[in-house]
Each structure stands twice: as C-alpha cells, then as structure tokens.
Amino acid sequence: MKTRTWIIIFSLACVLCVCVWLYFSAFLSPSETVGIYQDGVLVKQIDLSSVTQPEEITLSGEYGDNVILVSHGHIKMQSADCPDKLCVKHGELKSSASPIVCLPNKIVIKFEDNAPSADAMTGR
Amino acid sequence: MKTKKMIFTSVLTALALVSFVIEASIPPLTPIYGVKLGIANIFTLFTLYSIGAPYAFALLILRITIGSIFTGQLVSFLYSLAGGLLSFLLMILLKRFFPLRQLWVLSVLCAVTHNLGQLLTAVLITQTPQLMYYLPVLAVSGIIAGAFTGLCAQLVLKRLQKQISKQLNT
Amino acid sequence: MKLLRLFCIFIAAVTAISFGGCDIGSVYSSEFFAMDTVMTITAYGDNRENAVSAAQDRIYELDDLLSVQKEDSEIYKLNREKSLSVSPDTLSVIKRSKEISSLTDNCFDITCEPLMRAWGFYSGLKNKVPSQDEIETALKGVGTEHIKIDKNTVTLDKNTSLDLGAVAKGYASGEVYRVLKENGVSSALISLGGNVRAVGSKPDGSDWSVAICDPDDSTKQAGTLKISDTAVVTSGGYQRYFEENGQIYHHIIDTETGYPANSGLKSVTVVSQDDTLADGLSTALFVMGLQNAKKLYADNSSLFGAVFITDDNKIYITDNLINNFSSERSFEII
C-alpha cells in the first residue's frame, strides 16, 4: 500500500476515535453518585450532592496511602504515595468516561448508575 | 561479527534506557496512563531494522526491566511488559510487509497495539472494564506517538544503515 | 411504493408478534387485608390462582391463631388463662421467638405485651406516655424466662402476656412461601405489609428488586436490593408512632428500659433465607443499635445481611450485601 493510503487510514482512525470519545463524554451524563473501588471491590459509595462538610478518606495499598477529598459535588484524589501520582494530577472526577485511577494501589473512583425502579418496597 | 552486534545492541540499550529515564522524569501531559511519546521505542525499531529481531527483543526486555528499576515504578513493569511483548510480536510478524520507507506505518500499528495491551492489563488488574473508555484516547495517542518514533527511527536509519551494515559485516 | 407498503406491513407484523410474545395473562396478583396490614401476593406459573388462594387461606388461619387482639385467637386465650395447650403453629412461633431472643441477648422479646399496652399501641386504647410506675409494673412480667413450654402446653407467669407482632408476619411469609412452592409456583413476590419475600427469581430469570423505604418520606426509596428466593424485612420507628408534648414515641419498645428504643437508628432491613428470623432480627437489631448489630453480624454472617439507616441519615450495609445493594445515596460497608 502507498504511504498516502496509510496517512488517510490513520487520519480517519483518529477522527473516529475522537468522535467515539466525544460520544462517551456527552452521553454518559454524570450522576451525583460515585463509587470508590479497590481491587475491583466497592469500598464506599458517596452521593456527592449530600456531602456538606469536606471529608478526607484514606485508603492504604501496597504502595502507601491514597487520600481522597470529598466535598459537596466534588471528589478528587488529594494525595498519593505512589510514584507517578497520575491520580492526583487527574484532578476532580468530571465524567463517566474518565474515572480516576490509581494503578499502583488498584483504586478506581467512578460515577455509578442510578438505582433502577423496584418490584416491591419494604418498610412502608 | 557476533560480538560487534552484541556491543552495538548494548550501546543502543544504554541509549534507550537514558531516553526512557529522561522521558519518565518529564511531567506527563495528561493524567491518562499510557499517553506518552515512547522515545525509547525508537531504539527498538532501529535495532530491529539494522541488527535483527533477537537483538531487538533483548534490547526491549532489558530496557523494560532495568527501566522499571531505575524509575522505581515496579508496578508499571507489568503494564510495560504486557504492552511491549504484544507490540513486539506484531512487529516481527509484520516486518516483512514494511520496507524501511514505511517503517513509520509499522511503528504506528505497534504503538496502538502497545497501548491496547497496557489497557487490557489495567482492566485485568483493577477489575474495572470501564477503563476501556480510554481506548479512543490511547488509540489516537498511539497513532501520533507511533508516527513520531517511527519517523525518527526511519530518518536515522536512512542515513546510517549502509555504514552500520558495513561495520557489522567486517 | 409497493416496497414501502410491504415494509410497513412487515414492521406492523413484527410489532404485533413481539407484543403478543409478552403473555400478560401469566401473572396473578391478589391484594387483601390480614394481620392489620395490606398484603399482596404476585405469582407466576400455571397453578398461580389456586396457589395464591391457598396461601391466602393459610394467612387467615395464622392470623386467627396468632393475633393479640382477636378475642378467639390462641394467643388471646393464652394471655388470659396463662396456660394453654396450643396448636403446632403457635408453639413453633413461640419456640422460634425464644431462640431469636437468646441469639440477640433479649433485644427481641415477645413478652412485651404489657409494655405495648401501657404505651397504648393496641386498637381501642389511646396512645400515651405511661408513668414510671406503670412501666415498672409492666416490666415485672417481661422476659422470656417467664414462658414455660411443656410438650404443646405453654404456661406464662402471672404478669406475663405475649405479643407475636414482631414475628407473626415473618412466620406467615415463610408459610406462604412453602404453600406457593407446594402448589408448583416457582416465581412469586410476597409482600405482607412491608415484609417482602421472593420465591425464586423473576420469570425472566433476573433478580427481584426490592426498594427500601426512605424513613423520612415513604414515597421515596433509600436504596434497592436485588434478591432472589430470600426474605427482606424492615423495622423502623417511623412506621407507627405518636407525638406527645412535641416528643415522638414509636412502637418498637426496648424491653430493657420499657421505653421506645433509642439506639440511633431510623430503620433496619434484614435479608435472610429464614422469614421468621428476618422479621425478629429486624426488630432486635433496631433495638440493639449499630455497634451491637455489627458484633452480632460478625458471628452470624451466614445467617443474615442487613441495611441500617441511622438517625443522621447515613446508610451502612453488611459486606455480604455488596453485590445486592444499590443506592443513589452514600453508603458504607461494615
């Protein structure tokens, strides 16, 4: 194949990826409920709209502690002991499409889907 | 002749390591794992086209292992290894379809595969399939970074290849 | 044009078939009153109507045996005569209740009748805050040690009376479960005034989803549990209470103090395979509070799971419910 063909293919692939990314970001509207996972296990779920006082949550893993800061409507990784600190640089959790990830300590913070409708209610 | 190749590879490995360490100490552009240029990859491609696949493989494994120790990020060792091995496999499988003139195309394909491998490892380790959301970003980043490193290797090789093969064969 | 028309016909046919596919006739639901509450049984399967009516009869039968207020019930007679040879159902409820009392360090106690009476929680009585003397008197007969069982004869001490209100619905839902199963129903949802029991899973194989009532607003939900073949029971002070001098008094009485339990909880939801246990435990955990409930759970995590809503509106769930519980609100795992 000619070089020009490859350039066209790669450009198209780029455009496609950007479209997919925009689609993800636009249509996965963030809920207010976030889940904090460690090792794939839900550690804590927080409704950001109900948080009144800023609160720090500390999780420990193999590579030291991660401190998560929760305040009204916001959640972010405050500090981390891991070497690269990418989770701290991520800043606040903004979209379902980009969860906050700390690979060394296997922590993921992401938006949760809202609760579905129920078949029955207990305790009415 | 074999000794020359080995010496040559080790010099290139040292260069790859230096560039790897320098790149790791530059603050990342984005907070997403895997979005980076991968300058060290220039040396893998260079070795593959000028010396041979076994030497390039040795360089890759050494660079990943020692690089992880140098930067003190042993976690990233797993991710790098997964991505590195996957893309290297693709590299030797597809090499014969791409002459030196189109080395950058191969490099793009490998970079994208590399990022895919890293992402899959991350999904497995964190048990979070939602991380696949990052696939489009990592694909674009792979295309750009792959084109860059590929072109670098290609341009250098174009100027040095004759001299290198002359050196190695005497 | 002809092609377009054909296409339209095709689409119409597909729609008709897919609607016809959901056979709405395969479900039967019955709503009725018993045990002072509204009950609903929704069953799927071939024998659903017969099964539900058999279950309904069973509930009426149990209500006639176990009610504290019906004048011809066994419990009413037992409370009056203090010694009675009772039916196997009544005997079994009393025995199970004693078991749950000893499991929960007497935070659950069916001898609370004198207290419930003192606080006026029976129909025909007026809700009032009793005097300290009244409470002292009522407390004399409280305690499971005042119940003696000899074969099928139950004997109560002079001051003791029973109220099975905190387990009767649980026992009934267990019986409904058994009756439905015996009648070939493998998929049903039972709601006995807030005691929910799932028989199997939904006809499509997915889990039932049971909402937990928000203690502050009964039209809202505090969370949802995905369950199959399990009982879910919630106890909360918000369900029945009265106000006097600006103070709220609810119906779950701590038999230790004689006053409405004040353990920092708004409601407790218990999930268990055992209906009677779920019902009794929801009351017991509500009385003992979060800290003691945690300890009890640590020793009995295979028996039950629980969701706690505290006075400051925090939600805690036991770790065996992680995969079943979802909520829009914050919650923590204990």
Image: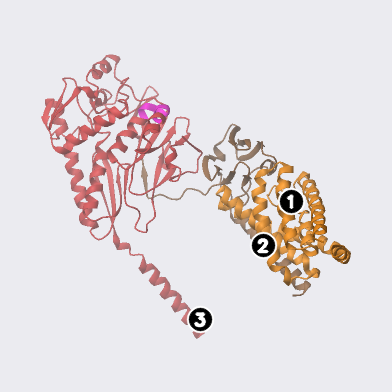
Chain colours: A brown, B orange, C red
Callout 3 amino acid: Leu
Q: Give the letter of the chain under mark 2.
A: B
Furthest residue to the top? C133
| Circles 2 and 1 on the same chain | yes
Which residue, given by chain and number where applicable, does mark 2 sit on?
Answer: B89
Residue at figure coordinates x 74%, y 52% from the top left: B36
Name the residue tied to disc 3.
Answer: C4
Q: Is residue A87 magenta?
A: no
What's the residue at 45%, 46% (across, down)?
C323
Circle 3: element type: helix
Disc 1: which chain?
Answer: B
> Main structural element of the magenta stretch: helix, strand or loop?
helix
Q: Which of pointers 3 and 1 indicates the residue nearer the eye?
A: 1
Q: Is residue C285 above or below residue B31?
A: above
Residue C291 inside the magenta-drawn segment? yes
Q: Which numbered disc covers residue B63? A: 1
Residue A66 occupies which quadrant of the picture? top right
The reply to whether callout 3 and callout 2 are in contact (CB within 8 Å) is no
Indicate the position of residue B154 as horizontal and vertical percent values: 82, 64
How far apart marks 3 and 1 lie (CA) works out to 64 Å
Q: Position of residue C145 (x, y in %)?
A: 22, 22
Tell me where residue C171 sits by quadrant.
Answer: top left
Q: Are marks 3 and 1 in contact (CB under 8 Å)?
A: no
Is residue C14 shown left or right of residue B143? left
Residue C221 visible in image: no
N-terminal-most mark, 2 or 1: 1
Q: What separation in Å lies between label 2 and label 1 (alpha carbons)?
A: 16 Å
Secondary element at tag 2 = helix
Q: Amino acid at mark 1?
A: Arg
Q: Which residues are magenta?
A: C286-293
Q: What amino acid type is highlighted by mark number 2?
A: Leu
> Left or right: A82 with respect to C119?
right
